[in-house]
């Protein structure tokens, strides 16, 4: 059956056995994933983390000529305000559900909101994003979509996020991409292919997207980049491309696989181009898929030479580094740290699943005893781990960097800063070298205490991770 | 029935309650909801108030309920979460706040709270689902919970404080200058011999909240402090004084005289203090005069912000600084009873000049109003930056949300706040003069350079 027939994608845990609470060595992680479906763990204490609704809003903020209608109480739209203000992106309205709407339903309100916003902005594309309240009430978004699509002659795409059906925020990307393709991709089946290549760029930093585009254009490719910066037509075009390339398997997998299964567009799942080694392998993968091996190899050599020249004799020799990143970024940065002579002493990844089995296998062969901690936004555990390891440097992309900073170690933020490709290596090396050169801010910060009790910091960091009793 | 809103700047009740709890030292929120509620608050509120983040990140204790809890109820998850929060997170008071999902499911929060109390946890609760209202209602719900439930937890022996007054109505972070404003109001009250109970910000913790019933007076800075003040009047008979807005500049003097008379303080001391503050400020005005003439301070302005802020700042700009109040847009949805008073005062700020006053939080409506007012100065939030740029006029970012300024200690209340506002406004006008020669030319052509 066509994947896209369903209302929404399946959750990450169902698709890929994704874990969000786990701690152990790389070797035990490998064992966990090698013996069939890993046992799901839950936390008996948790801290807030991102959810599918937040990821949907982040992705949608990057789509051109569109308006987002968030069908929810006000607070579910707070992150949309953030994207609007911080990035100057995204038109959005919130249906502002109140007490009465939670009892009576709010289809009429949604209808009115869609009509008003269509009249006001006359967008090419309109999204309706659901929310916990709407999911619990089972409000009928679908009939509003169908009626108003005809009445307004407007493409309306519903995004069925719930806030609770999955433990993984990344499910929100899948749910959103599912709907984008379902409503905008065109009919299932093989279309005549053209020369274009899909670059699957999902909520990447604009500089990162530019870097990937720069490299691919240097190979002479004609690109269709989506969903970042895409417009309505990009999704239709995606179905006729000759190939899809990932920048981040973690977020692109669903889109790549759907394009392959629905439209026969081959999908090259490539390593995330973070660090020299992985960027080289990414380019080589592109070259191989398109018969451009030689040019890819040449480009890699040229660009690596430039990077080596620009970072000079910068080294991390003798330094112990902790990483807390999205998984594919973490595996790339781990390699980069080693390329630069440093030692990674532990990693926190926001999730772990079948997509990472290869990376774990490879890493576990070299570092079977390396600590791996799986958590999205659980600084109480992370701080506990880091206090024990006391690394010299922390590289992270979470929302809680400021808390880690209170441990007094140099922190480099990989959130909202470019990290991809050759330019990413140079930029990261610069930021690390600055962070190590002057540590006074960290020292000042360490005078502020952490919000945790000493009793907790003496406990084992995985104390609150338990096997789920079904 | 609540209407849909374009790019709302007023988040939900849960987030308003979190703004209260996070602004008090030793108070720990325990969110009983879906995982994203805390992160939404961090991104959509805290991050848009650069420099206002007590815990060092987004992560606050949260039960992160899943599908299972939506179907079967989440009370047991809350029980576990509360118990472990008390074990892990340092705190003097734990405050359970609920989100939409757990309220719809019908989890019994009072029962869970009682279980916590039975184990001697210092815990209270507030039902704060996002569908119950916006940040301002959330502020009121959290304060109501504190007033009603804190006495049940007993009270450490504290020596009585003379001349204690509580300050209510400043919503932390929704007023980006909340901390600076509170500190300046506190400084002014100390100046006339009172002991201010700021309740929020640095050094403000459970002991201040336990003293709330002992106050001689509740000072209500915005309409959002009315309900808490009435509750305190009902419970403890404490009278209250409602201000007509944030007291900026001369309004601060009037407010000090009023309190002084109301509480029968030493009138000579009050007079002496107010006069010395005013002399200092007058000297600053005199020092500014040449720049005032050169930089073209005297402009028509449009101001977008919350009611107390708009009332206080517009009065100062027109009443002391000689600016012309063209259009005032109030974004915090004050209740009907307050709108009338605001309208009658603000439409006639300047004798013979009709000031337009609107109440809306809708981005498109606000942008249209700012555009059609076409004033030569815009003061508002980051959301008004685009329309100000379109008008090619100087812009001062001073209401929530903020994007390109850092606020740690600044405030616009009082005499010192008036100086700060002058600095911010003057800097915007001066840098515009340097960076926007087109605008300079057009003023020159009208002969008003």
Image (tube, grey):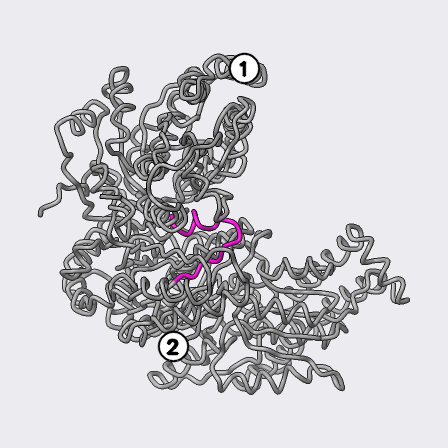
Q: Is residue B302 above or below residue A205?
A: below
Q: Which residues are magenta?
A: A55-70
- Mark 2, other Cα within 10 Å: few <14 / some 14–19 / many ≥20: some
Q: Are marks 1 and 2 on the same chain?
A: no
Quarter of the figure with residue A271 = top left
State which chain disc 2 sits on: B
- Mark 1, other Cα within 10 Å: few <14 / some 14–19 / many ≥20: some
In this rendering, does residue A437 appear at all?
no
State which chain disc 1 sits on: A
In the rendered image, residue A230, in percent from the top left (x then y), is placed at 49, 44
In the rendered image, residue B246, in percent from the top left (x then y), is placed at 58, 73
Residue at image mark 2: B214
In screen coordinates, is B77 left or right of A250? left
Looking at this view, is B373 or A324 the one in front? B373
Q: Is residue B395 above or below residue B319?
A: above
The question of residue A68 being in magenta is answered with: yes
Residue at image mark 1: A308
Quarter of the image containing the N terminus of chain A?
A: top left
In the rendered image, residue B140, in percent from the top left (x then y), is placed at 39, 73
């Amino acid at each position: 059956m066509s994947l896209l027939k369903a209302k929404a994608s399946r959750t990450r845990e169902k698709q890929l056995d994704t874990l969000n609470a786990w701690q152990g060595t790389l070797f035990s992680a490998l064992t966990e994933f090698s013996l069939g479906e890993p046992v799901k763990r839950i936390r008996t204490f948790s801290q807030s983390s991102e959810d599918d609704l937040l990821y949907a809003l982040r992705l949608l903020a990057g789509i051109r000529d569109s308006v987002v209608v968030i069908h929810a109480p006000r607070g579910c739209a707070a992150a949309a305000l953030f994207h609007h203000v911080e990035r100057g992106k995204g038109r959005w309205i919130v249906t502002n559900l109140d007490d009465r709407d939670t009892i009576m339903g709010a289809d009429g309100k949604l209808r009115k909101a869609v009509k008003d916003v269509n009249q006001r902005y006359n967008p090419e594309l309109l999204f309706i994003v659901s929310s916990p309240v709407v999911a619990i009430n089972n409000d009928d978004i679908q009939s509003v979509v169908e009626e108003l699509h005809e009445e307004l002659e407007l493409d309306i795409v519903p995004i069925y996020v719930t806030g609770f059906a999955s433990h993984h925020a990344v499910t929100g990307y899948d749910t959103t991409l599912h709907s984008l393709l379902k409503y905008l991709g065109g009919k299932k089946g093989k279309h005549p292919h053209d020369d274009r290549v899909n670059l699957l760029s999902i909520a990447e930093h604009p500089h990162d997207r530019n870097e990937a585009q720069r490299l691919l254009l240097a190979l002479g490719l004609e690109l269709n980049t989506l969903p970042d910066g895409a417009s309505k037509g990009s999704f239709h075009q995606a179905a006729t491309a000759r190939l899809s390339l990932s920048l981040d398997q973690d977020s692109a997998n669903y889109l790549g696989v759907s394009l392959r299964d629905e439209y026969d567009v081959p999908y090259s799942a490539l390593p995330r181009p973070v660090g020299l080694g992985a960027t080289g392998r990414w380019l080589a993968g592109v070259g191989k898929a398109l018969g451009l091996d030689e040019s890819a190899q040449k480009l890699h050599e040229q660009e690596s030479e430039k990077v080596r020249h620009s970072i000079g004799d910068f080294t991390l020799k003798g330094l112990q580094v902790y990483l807390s990143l999205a998984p594919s970024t973490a595996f790339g940065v781990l390699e980069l740290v080693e390329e630069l002579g440093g030692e990674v002493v532990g990693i926190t990844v926001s999730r772990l699943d079948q997509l990472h089995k290869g990376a774990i296998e490879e890493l576990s062969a070299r570092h079977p005893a390396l600590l791996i901690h799986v958590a999205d936004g659980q600084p109480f555990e992370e701080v506990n781990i880091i206090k024990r390891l006391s690394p010299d440097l922390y590289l992270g992309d979470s929302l809680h960097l400021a808390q880690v900073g209170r441990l007094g170690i140099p922190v480099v933020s990989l959130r909202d800063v470019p990290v991809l490709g050759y330019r990413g290596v140079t930029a990261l090396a610069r930021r690390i070298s600055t962070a190590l050169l002057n540590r006074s801010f960290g020292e000042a910060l360490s005078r502020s205490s952490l919000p945790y009790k000493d009793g907790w910091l003496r406990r084992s960091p995985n104390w609150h991770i338990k096997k789920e009793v079904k | 029935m609540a209407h849909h809103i374009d790019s709302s700047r007023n988040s939900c009740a849960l987030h308003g309650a979190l703004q209260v709890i996070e602004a008090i030292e030793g108070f720990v929120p325990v969110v009983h909801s879906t995982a994203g509620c805390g992160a939404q608050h961090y991104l959509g509120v805290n991050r848009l108030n650069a420099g206002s983040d007590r815990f060092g990140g987004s992560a606050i204790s949260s039960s992160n309920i899943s599908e299972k809890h939506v179907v079967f109820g989440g009370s047991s998850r809350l029980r576990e979460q509360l118990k472990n929060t008390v074990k892990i997170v340092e705190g003097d008071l734990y405050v359970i706040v609920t989100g939409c999902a757990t309220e719809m499911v019908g989890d019994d929060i009072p029962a869970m709270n009682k279980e916590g109390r039975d184990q001697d946890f210092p815990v209270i609760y507030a039902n704060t689902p996002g569908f119950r209202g916006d940040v301002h209602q959330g502020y009121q719900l959290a304060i109501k919970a504190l007033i009603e439930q804190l006495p049940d937890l007993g009270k450490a022996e504290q020596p009585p404080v003379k001349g204690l007054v509580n300050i209510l109505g400043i919503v932390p972070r929704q007023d980006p200058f909340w901390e600076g404003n509170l500190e300046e109001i506190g400084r002014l009250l100390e100046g006339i011999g009172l002991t201010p109970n700021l309740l929020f910000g640095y050094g403000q913790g459970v002991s201040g909240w336990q003293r709330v019933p002992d106050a001689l007076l509740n000072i209500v800075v915005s309409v959002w402090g009315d309900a808490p003040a009435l509750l305190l009047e009902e419970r403890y008979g404490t009278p209250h004084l409602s201000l007509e807005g944030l007291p900026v500049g001369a309004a601060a003097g009037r407010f000090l005289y009023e309190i002084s008379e109301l509480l029968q303080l030493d009138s000579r001391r009050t007079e002496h203090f107010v006069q010395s503050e005013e002399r200092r400020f007058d000297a600053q005005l005199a020092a500014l005069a040449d720049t005032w003439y050169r930089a073209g301070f005297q402009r028509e302005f449009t101001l977008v912000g919350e009611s107390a802020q708009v009332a206080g700042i517009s009065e100062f700009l027109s009443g002391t600084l000689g600016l012309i109040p063209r259009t005032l847009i109030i974004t915090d949805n004050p209740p009907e009873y307050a709108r009338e008073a605001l309208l009658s005062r603000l439409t006639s700020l300047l004798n013979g000049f009709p000031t337009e006053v609107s109440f809306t939080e809708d981005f498109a409506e606000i942008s249209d109003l700012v555009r059609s007012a076409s004033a030569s100065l815009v003061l508002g939030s980051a959301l008004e930056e685009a329309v100000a740029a379109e008008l090619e006029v100087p812009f001062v970012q001073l209401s929530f949300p903020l994007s390109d300024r850092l606020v740690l200690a600044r405030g616009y209340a009082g005499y010192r706040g008036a100086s700060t506002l002058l600095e911010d406004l003057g800097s915007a006008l001066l840098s515009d003069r340097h960076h926007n020669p087109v605008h300079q030319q057009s003023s020159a052509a009208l002969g008003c350079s």
